[in-house]
Structure formats: structure tokens, C-alpha cells
């Protein structure tokens, strides 16, 4: 099933789309023309473990992806039986937010119950945890974006929603993309996951933790606009915006931020 742009056609990969072409609050020097995010330099997706041979060709040759950042933990891959990606011509970089993520029955049950009780609060806590633990992972991703703006990369986790959404959200905030476009990009996961929902539901049905609390499970799988809107506010309030977060949690400097802006902002 093909989805409209910004989604991409990569056989066997769910929720894959380009992050680019979005307007920012920056303007071209000497004019009032807005600057836009360079298209097709950064891609995001859910797990690519079911990628087909034709999908590998599409990823490398059609999209030009040379490096893939995998934000999943080893325990997560084992829990879901998802193998690491192997694509000739692509470097696969492990960038887990945390290898200590727990996928034992008790931990999963607590997580699902939290999303059943208060979805918004559960997302706020989850995304704050990702930000606090994810500095080393984001450092790898942003150093690539700084050093290789002409080498497209893919960032993914399992659904391509939470860890990936925070990574992309930080990037878009850093570049001055308007909040509503950041929120809209996050919410596109609802469309991106739709073709995969039968398979995801089948996976959930195999574990009683998910099966016995489907409301909490579906809340956990959601990507409602208000979740990212609250996250943007939280990043500004608790970390001083994307710049403040990246200064305190990665090796990037103000000079690096300027290099990234110069590389990824353009007129259309």
C-alpha cells in the first residue's frame, strides 16, 4: 500500500517518510522570504526488520540513505523477535536511548496500566525519560547531521513514533520549524502505522499484558497532536529549548548549531 508524500515507498518498512520541505521562522538574508528545511536529507521510520530485497534497493538507490540509526535496545529486539537491519551500502549505527529498558512482564504491565489511567501524563513521563537518557544516542545522530548533510540518513525505533519522534522533534525545533508543522509531522505516524496495524494487533494479542488491557495498549501506540504539543512545551520549560537540551546532553556547541542551520535551511 502506497501512502502520499511525505511517506516513501520502501518495501517492508513501516511508517517511513521524509523530514523536509517544512517552513521555518528564519528568512533569507536581505529579504523576507522564508527559509525551508532541506528535503530528503533525513528520513524516519518504524522497525525495518521486514525489509525486502527490493526495499533495500529503494532505501539505498531511491532515497540515497547511507547510514541508519537504530534506536532500539537489545532487549526490545529480543522481546519482539526483530532482527537488526543489514543493507549493503548502508552503515548501521546502534543508538539505543537505553540498554536498560525493561521488557519483562511486570515492567510492561506497569507501562500499559499507566497509559490506560492517564495517556497524556504517561507520554509526558515517557518523553521526559527519553530526553534524560537519550543524550548519547542523540549525539550520534546530530553529529552525523552536522558532518554529513549531503549523506541522507534514516532514524528508526520500533514504531517510529516515540524515540524517533523526539529525535526528529529536536532537529525541527533546532532549525526553527514552526510548532504546528512539528506537531503535524509527529501525528503523521497515525497514517504511517495504519497499514501495519493488523500485524501490530496480532503481536499484541500474543501477550496477555497487552491483550488484557487493549485500551492502554492502543493509547500507548497513539500519536495524537496534543502529545507532541505538550512535549515541545516541556522541552522549552525544562531544558531551555532544543539548543539548551543539546548543549547539556550532547557534545554539540552553538557553533555546531549554526553549521547545521547553514546546511539544512534553504530557499524554495
Image (spheres, rainbow, N blue to C red):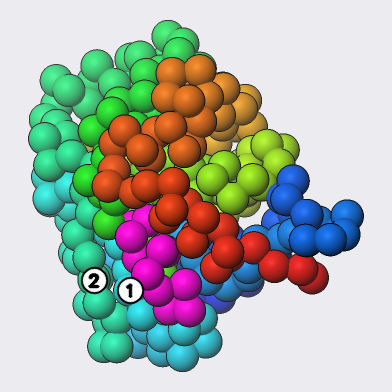
* Residue found farthest to the right: 32
Q: Indicate yes or no whether the magenta region holds residue 144.
A: yes
**Residue 169 location, x and y as percent?**
52, 43
Q: How many marks?
A: 2
Q: Vertical placement of 155 versus 220: above or below?
A: below
Contact? badges 1 and 2 (CB < 8 Å): yes
Q: Vertical placement of 198 versus 1: above or below?
A: above
Residue at figure coordinates x 84%, y 61% from the top left? 30
One can see residue 205 in this view: no
Residue at numbered disc 1? 67
**Residue 142 location, x and y as percent?**
37, 56
Nearer the observer, 254 or 7: 254
Numbered circle sitting on residue 114: none
State which region is magenta: 141-152
Q: Quadrant of residue 190?
A: top right
User: Image quadrant for the N terminus?
Assistant: bottom right
Nearer the observer, 38 or 192: 38
User: Image quadrant for the C terminus?
Assistant: bottom right
Residue at figure coordinates x 52%, y 24% from the top left? 236
Q: Vertical placement of 82 versus 178: above or below?
A: below
Q: Quadrant of residue 19?
A: bottom right
**Residue 11 location, x and y as percent?**
46, 77
Q: Secondary structure at mark 2?
A: strand
* Residue found farthest to the front: 30
The local crowd at label 1, few if under 14, some if 14 to 19, many if 20 or more residues have their Cα within 10 Å, is many
Q: 36 left or right of 203? A: right
Residue at numbered disc 2? 92
Q: Estimate the spatial distance between the alpha carbons at disc 1 and disc 2, rounded to whole Å.
A: 6 Å
Q: 73 left or right of 32? A: left
Question: Which of the two labelled residues, at mark 1 and mark 2, occupies the earlier sequence position?
Answer: 1
Nearer the observer, 56 or 108: 56
Amino acid at each position: 500500500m502506497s501512502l502520499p508524500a511525505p511517506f516513501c515507498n520502501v518495501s517492508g518498512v513501516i511508517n517511513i517518510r521524509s523530514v523536509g520541505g517544512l517552513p521555518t521562522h528564519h528568512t533569507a538574508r536581505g529579504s523576507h522570504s522564508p527559509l525551508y528545511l532541506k528535503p530528503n536529507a533525513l528520513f524516519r521510520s518504524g522497525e525495518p526488520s521486514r525489509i525486502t530485497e527490493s526495499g533495500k534497493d529503494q532505501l539505498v538507490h531511491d532515497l540515497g540513505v547511507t547510514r541508519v540509526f537504530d534506536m532500539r535496545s537489545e532487549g526490545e529486539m529480543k522481546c519482539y523477535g526483530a532482527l537488526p537491519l543489514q543493507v549493503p551500502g548502508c552503515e548501521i549505527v546502534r543508538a539505543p536511548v537505553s540498554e536498560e529498558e525493561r521488557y519483562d512482564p511486570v515492567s510492561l504491565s506497569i507501562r500499559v496500566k499507566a497509559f490506560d489511567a492517564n495517556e497524556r501524563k504517561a507520554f509526558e513521563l515517557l518523553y521526559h525519560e527519553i530526553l534524560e537518557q537519550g543524550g548519547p544516542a542523540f549525539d550520534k545522530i546530530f553529529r552525523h547531521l552536522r558532518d554529513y548533510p549531503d549523506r541522507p540518513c534514516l532514524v528508526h525505533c520500533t514504531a517510529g513514533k516515540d524515540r524517533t519522534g523526539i529525535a526528529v522533534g529536536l532537529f525541527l525545533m533546532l532549525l526553527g520549524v514552526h510548532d504546528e508543522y512539528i506537531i503535524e509531522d509527529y501525528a503523521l505516524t497515525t497514517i504511517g502505522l495504519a497499514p501495519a496495524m493488523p500485524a501490530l494487533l496480532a503481536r499484541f494479542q500474543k501477550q496477555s499484558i497487552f491483550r488484557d488491557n487493549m485500551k492502554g495498549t492502543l493509547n500507548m501506540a497513539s500519536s495524537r497532536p496534543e502529545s507532541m504539543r505538550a512535549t515541545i512545551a516541556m522541552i522549552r520549560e525544562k531544558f531551555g529549548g532544543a539548543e539548551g537540551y543539546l548543549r547539556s546532553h550532547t557534545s554539540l556547541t552553538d557553533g555546531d548549531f549554526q553549521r547545521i542551520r547553514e546546511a539544512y535551511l534553504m530557499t524554495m
